[in-house]
Image (cartoon, rainbow, N blue to C red):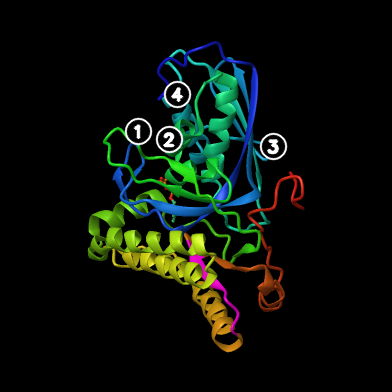
Amino acid sequence: LLAGQEGTPQALGSGFAPANIALCKYWGKRDDELNLPMTSSLSVSLGALGTRTDLSVRDGGDEVLLDGELVPPADSFAARITSFLDLIRSESGPGFRVATQNAMPTAAGLASSASGFAALVLALKEVMGWDLDSRALSMLARLGSGSACRSLFSGFVEWHVGVRDDGMDSYAEPIDCVWPDFRIAPVTVSAERKSIGSREAMRRTRDTSRLYEAWPAQVAEDLLAIRAALRERDFVRLGETAEANALAMHATMMASRPAVLYWRPETLETIRRAWRLREERGIPVYCTMDAGPNVKLIFLRESTAAIESEFDAVEIINPFETATTAKSEY
Ligand code: DP6
């Protein structure tokens, strides 16, 4: 990927990338080193919510800061960044100071590794002077965290599974669909640390869950439905498919030996509340869940008042709001 890109590093660079939530999930890898997925996946980026990374070259080892605080090098957050940097630099360096700031709703439980690696790749592009297009940048971000390859783009994004062993055809691309009324709202049911990281959980599911055998075919079907729903702006089809896809992913995890179960009682309670809104009041609201207990609601702008009255203090995200009009700032 970086052949012919050697130059003299610049002193400073920075990058911003949005967080993203998958509507058709990435779960399971065919290559654990290169983060090559078993299937394609499709997400929506969260506009102005994401990660900003400021990067500078420094003598000595790396230094990682999160929201202004120095992170100990042994911490898994810093260790993951350093091993990613090791992939792109020679043995003689350089060292980097990586200052990361997350702009996420308070404790919303949104994954920051995707936006984090995407922002880091953008900052590195500036510092290293790489002449790379967004496809190459997406593949570089993928090496840090699979879902990071989708955070290079805004709006709806598809990550193509690819067939090559070297991963050179496994990258994300934006989908030509602007949907200003689309909304997503994270409902935090627990801010506790995960019982098992997604990396290990994915591996266990692939290796031990018999239900996982059915997953690739399910994803193929769901992707067709979601692409069609986006084309036709068919929100009900989009929501139904995204929710069913998330539930199917969790079913594959639960069938792992030993089981991977991220849900808490409040997870199910939140899902049931959304279903009640749908069944009793005809509000088209759907749920999606990732590798944790929190639920993200998806709905349209017209349902905002109903969602706000049912879910206390919920923070509603408009993925198509631009950074300049967004309320959230660093
Ligand atoms: C459930 O991208 O965090 O959020 O590639 O091991 O870093 P690694 O995994 P990661 O997994 C995300 C899983 C998911 C679904 C998704 O975002 O598609």
Pointer 1 residue: 168
**Neighbour class for label 2 at 10 Å: few (<14), some, many (≥20)?**
many
Magenta stretch, residue numbers: 282-289
Where is 309 relative to 235, above or below?
Answer: below
Which quarter shows the C terminus?
top right
Looking at this view, is 187 or 185 the one in front? 185
Identity of the amino acid at label 2? Met
The disc labelled 3 sits on which kind of residue?
Answer: Gly
Q: x and y percent of residue 308 in the render?
A: 70, 73
Question: Residue 255, relative to residue 165: is it above or below?
Answer: below
Label 3 or label 4, whichever lies nearer to me, is 4
Disc 1 is placed on an element classified as loop
Dot 1 or dot 3, earlier in sequence: 3
* Pointer 2 or 3: first along the chain: 3
Image quadrant of residue 25?
Answer: bottom left
Badge number at residue 88:
4
Is there a contact, CB below 8 Å, between mark 1 and mark 4? no
8 relative to 63, above or below = above
Quarter of the picture containing the N terminus is top left
Instruction: Please tell me whether mark 4 or mark 2 is closer to you in this view.
Output: 2
